[in-house]
Every structure is written in structure tokens, then in C-alpha cells.
Amino acid sequence: MAGAIIENMSTKKLCIVGGILLVFQIIAFLVGGLIAPGPTTAVSYMSVKCVDVRKNHHKTKWLMPWGPNQCDKIRDIEEAIPREIEANDIVFSVHIPLPSMEMSPWFQFMLFILQLDIAFKLNNQIRENAEVSMDVSLAYRDDVFAEWTEMAHERVPRKLKCTFTSPKTPEYEGRYYECDVLPFMEIGSVAHKYYLLNIRLPVNEKKKINVGIGEIKDIQLVGIHQNGGFTKVWFAMKTFLTPSIFIIMVWYWRRITMMSRPPVLLEKVIFALGISMTFINIPVEWFSIGFDWTWMLLFGDIRQGIFYAMLLSFWIIFCGEHMMKVNTQMSTITTISSALASALLVPRTKDQHERNHIAGYWKQVGPIAVGSFCLFIFDMCERGVQLTNPFYSIWTTDVGTELAMAFIIVAGICLCLYFLFLCFMVFQVFRNISGKQSSLPAMSKVRRLHYEGLIFRFKFLMLITLACAAMTVIFFIVSQVTEGHWKWGGVTVQVNSAFFTGIYGMWNLYVFALMFLYAPSHKNYGEDQSNGDLGVHSGEELQLTTTITHVDGPTEIYKLTRKEAQE
């Protein structure tokens, strides 16, 4: 009778397949570490203080910090006093990029954070809960001689979080406050060559606008964008992996549909996982090189969310489908309350038809759905709004901060519940399989060796899953604590790039291996390997409670590890 490929594959062939996948995994890390540059670049911009003495500031006039049409500038705020220049007449101008450089669509996105240099003055101190209100205009052009085109114009409020470490006495006047950096702007595409920011700090004492914010000396911006070289490597990986996963997905589903029975739950989930991986791989980012698609960051977040939700659901269902249906007392979980046990375990009274539906796992999959929904709403409140207002940040208001924290906390609780369910189910699967190994000595030598191999391969796949998850966490931590690159002799390894390409390649290989190893096999076993020669007494039947079955019934690996005691 036929089974899954992993059941019928010899240990030698399984090692060969594993070796090939390992080679591709190493290549994925090396591509990012040795070929690609760092994923992102940070550039510092110091604003230039321009003077706009027009009576009507509402009329658009773009003030350039340098170049042939540069504005009338002042070196510092003190220079404005003898020239009778008011605070409302000062415009902080920033040109992006720096002189003699151009932006490129290969940069993919622009993220800016803002740093205010605020000097301490006895008669102009920063009050508690002070808020700075900026009138910001953003423009672009693609030629140095072309006119600027307005892209956005918004009133941008930001709360100041500053401390002054020295005594607040006259001799310490002029020293700077230590202020936290502020989120400023995020754009999901870089479709133009030049950008210009004009930032005003309008003062209105009657309305308490920009009053009690200290003496702002300078405004500094730090712009972060993706490196063009890394973008090209990333696009190349996506272009290569898309047909690879798509072909194995079509091949897998074709073998499923060739069966005389309809697909079962685990087969559907594996196929859905392949679809979500293909959805991530499709290199639609190529179009962002020619089109101004500012929604690409949000779209990328949605694609990743769908994949991770499917991956977490697969792990739960994969473990649940290998839980044993043992008609014995609940003595195996006496240390756990009955309420927790009923929530963690797939109900043992379910029949095969019930277990073939996702509704049978609502307690385990529910936290995934709730957590994913919370993160989706959070992303829509942040990057969704930024599609129309690039200066928006949900963290800039008290209500927004509380709302964002609420979504994140709920998602974190759901994640903890999920891992509690998953760890308990994995423990139960390994415990039950180990308990059934005591029946192996009663079998014939050939059949015992066959089943020992099946158990080994199942445990091996479970350990590979844990290894992939562990590698993702480890490489993420390493990429955060290192300087971004390692130097070994004359070779420079880009750690952050290796993390992105290596982990991305790893999950592609993981999905590829799942669809290949769990596709139906064309091999058949002889009649001598039926249940008759198991040598099990008292009418005991060994099998797993999985829903993967072939034409004639459950496959070999799943029949082995479920024991139904017949009284």
C-alpha cells in the first residue's frame, strides 16, 4: 500500500536530500554575507536655517539650502535678533540627498527620524509635557533645473522628552538638553531623484503653540533607506525562488489529486503553506522600480503576516494530527488541570471525519487568528495612514500610544498561549511515540527496522522544525547586537544581510521539503507487511491519529504510533 514519500524513502536517500538542502541553505547565507552589501544605509542631514520674510507664508515658496537658487540663510538663532527676524520667518530646509548625489528607486523606502538641538535658557525652559508643532512641506523633482512639486504638507505635532543633567543656573545657560529622537517621516517608495523638506516652527502665544519648548538651535534628520545593491540581490533571490516553490507546489497538489479520495486536512494545510510562501516570493517589487507604489511596505507586511499565520497553524495541526487516540484514563496528564488539558489536547472522542476540519482546532488556532488580526489593525493604523500622510505616527499621541500598546499586548498574550499549546502537544507526541516503541520487539526484524526508520524520520522532521525556529531567533539576536559586519582576514561578512537572505532561504527550503516529503509515494508494500505480522497481542492496533491516508487507509507511519485498546 502507498504512503508518504518520507515513509518509503531510505535513510541514505533522505540524507542525500537533506545534504542538498543544506548546501542551498549555506549558499543562501553566503549570498547575503559575501555578495550583498548591508541592508540599509543611514545618512545624517543638518538643516539649514533659511529666512522667509514674506507677509503671506501660506503661498508656496520652496527654500533651497544650497545651489544656484539658495535661500537667504542665517548661521544661528542669535544672528536673527539684530536683523529683527522673527521665529515665524525661520524655515529649516533639508535637501535629500546630499549635494552631488541622487536618490534611486532601488532604495525602496525612506525612513527619517528627527533630533532637536535645544539649548537651556532660564527664561525659556522646556515645560512638562511640552509639544512641538511643526509645519512641514515635502516636495520632489527629477531634474536640478525643474520646479519643485509638492508631495505633502502637514502640521506635525511631536511630544518632547528631554532632560537637563546640569543644574538649572545662569552659568549653565546655552548647554543642550538631552532629548529623545522623534519619528518624523516614512515613505514606501523612492520614485524621484530629489526631495526637499521645509520645516517651520510657527509660534502663537495666544493658542500656546510652540510655547515652553526651549530655544531650538538646530534640527537634524537621519534618513534610512535600503541599499540598492542589497535590493538587487533580494530581487534576484525572489525571482529564483518563485518558480522553485511554485513548481513543487503544483507537483505536490497533482499527486494529491491523483488519489481516489479527497484531500485531507494536513494535506490542505501544507498546500496552503506553499501558496502563502509563493505569495511572499512573487517579486512584485520589480514594478516598484518603474511605478510610485507607496503601499509596498504595507503590502509586504500583509504577505509576511499571512505566511507566519499559516506556518503557526501548520505546526499546531501537524502536531495535533499525530496525537494518539488512546482510550485509556487521563493518568498521563495527572499533573495538569483538566481545564488546561481539555484546551491543549485535541478531544480524544473525535472521529476521523471531525478531525479532518479546521474547526476541530479552534482552541489552538484561535489565538493565531486573534493575534494576527490585532497586528493587522496596528499596521493599518500606522502604515495605512502613512499612505496619505507620510509624517503620521501612532506613537505621537497618548490615545494612539495606548491603542498601539493594547494591540501589541493582546498579540503577545495570544503568542504566549499559542506556544503553550504547541509545546505541550509536541511533548505529548514525543512521549506517546516513545511509549509505543516498546511494541517493536514483538515484530519481525524487517518490519521492526522499517518502523524504527519511520519513527526516526518523524522525530527528525520535528527537530528540524525546532531548529529552523531557533535559527530565526538566534540570527535575529546576533544581527541586533553586532555591528552589522564581521571581518575575517581580508573577507568582510555582512551579518545583517546574511540574516535576511539566509532566514528567507531557510523557510523556502523548509516549505519545499514539506511538500516533497509529505507528497504521496508511488511505492507499495507487499501483503506480508500488513498488520497481520505485527505480533501485537490482545487485538491492539498501532497507529497515529493523523488524517493523511492513502487509497486503502492510513499510511504506515501514522498507523504505527496510535494505540487503540480494545476491551
Image (spheres, rainbow, N blue to C red):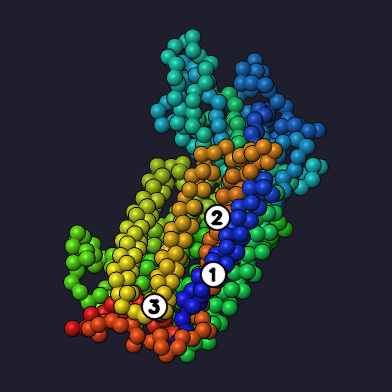
CA gap between label 2 and label 1 equals 27 Å
Dot 3 alpha-carbon crowd within 10 angstroms: few under 14, some 14 to 19, many 20 or more? few
Outermost residue, front side: 445
CA gap between label 3 and label 1 equals 19 Å
User: Badges 2 and 3: C-beta atoms under 8 Å apart?
Assistant: no
User: Badges 2 and 1: C-beta atoms under 8 Å apart?
Assistant: no
**On the image, which quarter does residue 419 sit in?**
bottom left
Mark 2 lies on residue:
503
> What residue is at 51 percent from the left and 48 percent from the top?
475
Dot 1 alpha-carbon crowd within 10 angstroms: few under 14, some 14 to 19, many 20 or more? few
Dot in front, 2 or 1: 1
> What residue is at 50 percent from the left and 63 percent from the top?
307
The quarter of the rendered structure image containing the N terminus is bottom left
The three-letter code of the residue at mark 1 reads Lys
Mark closer to the chain start, 3 or 1: 1
In this rendered view, identify the residue nearer to me: 238 or 73: 238
Left or right of 139? Residue 495 is: left
The three-letter code of the residue at mark 2 reads Ile
Mark 1 lies on residue:
12
Dot in front, 2 or 3: 3
Mark 3 lies on residue:
445
Dot 2 alpha-carbon crowd within 10 angstroms: few under 14, some 14 to 19, many 20 or more? many
Q: Is residue 192 above or below residue 95?
A: below
The quarter of the rendered structure image containing the C terminus is bottom left
CA gap between label 2 and label 3 equals 41 Å
> What residue is at 50 percent from the left and 70 percent from the top?
11
Left or right of 13? Residue 103 is: right
> What residue is at 40 percent from the left and 28 percent from the top?
128
x, y percentage for residue 350?
28, 78
Local SS, label 2: helix
In this view of the protein, can residue 512 be seen by the observer?
no
